[in-house]
């Protein structure tokens, strides 16, 4: 019975197209730090479509292709953009790890902030939106002094601003 429930949960588990992310503005470390949860099958499909890479990537496994992290970083830098004071910031890929169910991956990356005081951030998050019309990306954003905001990104609204 438990095996049947596990199989059914896998079959139904991915009808909703959603990523979630935690974004922290860390003034002490002068960076915008991101933890993002993305379903592996969709992520690999998007990377392959965008780059023309034809091999199965096996992200997060011992079979992962050598260029896995670099392909992932390039994809994220094109689809998750942070702008501070109207200047785009450079994405620095930190790493990744599989989720407990092995269906998704947690990606960790950051955007170093310059010495210029930053008070306004603009986030563009269109991760996987080229794949699904109903894709939604949710961000929990925490600024200095624990100011918290929740942002929802959809294909027709993939950019939002945040001030702290």
Image (spheres, helix red, strand yellow):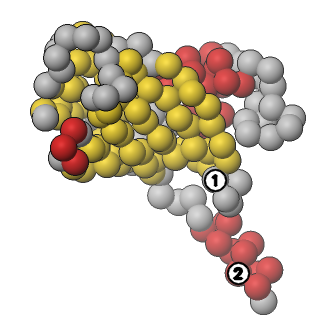
Q: Is residue 103 visible?
A: no
* One can see residue 6 in this view: yes
Residue lying at the far front of the rendered structure: 28
Q: Position of residue 90 (x, y in %)?
A: 41, 13
Residue extending farthest to the right is: 63
Residue at image x 27%, y 29%? 27
**162, above or below 97, in the image:** above
Q: Nearer the viewer, mark 1 or mark 2?
A: 1
**Mark identifier at residue 148:** none
Q: Residue 4, position in %: x, y?
A: 77, 81
Q: Earlier in the sequence, mark 1 or mark 2?
A: 2
| Residue at the (33%, 22%) spot, across then down | 30
Residue 94 picture quarter: top right
Identify the secondary structure beneath mark 2.
helix
Q: CA distance from mark 1 to mark 2?
A: 19 Å
Residue for badge 1: 99
């Amino acid at each position: 019975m438990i095996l049947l429930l596990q199989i059914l949960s896998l079959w139904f588990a991915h009808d909703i197209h959603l990523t979630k992310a935690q974004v922290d503005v860390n003034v002490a470390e002068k960076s915008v730090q991101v933890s993002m949860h993305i379903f592996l099958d969709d992520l690999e499909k998007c990377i392959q479509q965008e780059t023309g890479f034809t091999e199965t990537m096996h992200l997060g496994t011992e079979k992962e292709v050598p260029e896995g992290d670099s392909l992932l970083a390039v994809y994220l830098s094109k689809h998750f953009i942070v702008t501070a004071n109207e200047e785009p910031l450079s994405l620095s890929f930190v790493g990744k790890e599989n989720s407990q169910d092995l269906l998704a991956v947690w990606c960790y990356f950051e955007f170093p902030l310059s010495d210029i005081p930053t008070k306004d951030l603009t986030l563009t998050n269109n991760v996987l939106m080229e794949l699904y019309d109903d894709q939604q990306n949710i961000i929990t954003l925490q600024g200095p002094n624990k100011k918290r905001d929740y942002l929802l990104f959809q294909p027709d609204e993939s950019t939002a601003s945040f001030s702290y």
